[in-house]
Image: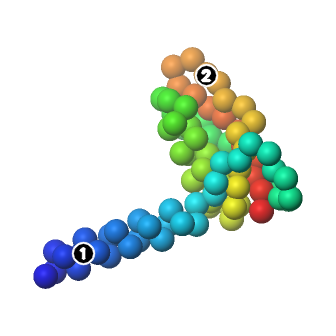
Amino acid sequence: MKTLLIAVLTFTAAVASSAFAAQEINQPEGLQKVGTVSDSSGATSLTDLEAKLQAKATEAGASAFRITSAGGNNTLSGTADIYR
């Protein structure tokens, strides 16, 4: 019973946190730019970099983000505009 409760609480927390994550967009139509975020912590793939930028956008209170630059040789860094 205790294991089931822990599993349910973990699942609920995961769903709740993903529901408020900033969404990647292509066009910021109708949204207000509120700043930029960047990451240079050593992402090894574009997917990893996107996730790191999304986390930073969400932490900054943004509802959406648009990646504006990405690059690097062995590790990637990038920036994104954030919107509300």
The reply to whether residue 36 is visible in this rendering is: no
The reply to whether residue 38 is visible in this rendering is: yes
Say which residue label 2 marks. Answer: 72
Three-letter residue code for mark 1: Ile
Three-letter residue code for mark 2: Gly
Residue 76 figure quarter: top right
Say which residue label 1 marks. Answer: 6
Q: Which residue lies at the image location 48% right of the left edge and 71% below the top edge? A: 16
Q: Earlier in the sequence, mark 1 or mark 2?
A: 1
Instruction: State the residue in front, 81 or 11.
Output: 11
Residue 45, above or below 11: above
Residue 15, above or below 72: below
Q: CA distance from mark 1 to mark 2?
A: 41 Å
Q: Which residue lies at the image location 85% right of the left edge and 53% below the top edge? A: 29
Name the disc covering residue 38, or none.
none
Q: Position of residue 23 (x, y in %)?
A: 64, 54
Residue 13 figure quarter: bottom left
Give the class, few, some or many, for how many residues have Cα within 10 Å of label 1's Cα (few <14, many ≥20): few
Quadrant holding the C terminus: bottom right
Quadrant holding the N terminus: bottom left
Which mark lies nearer to you, 1 or 2?
Answer: 1
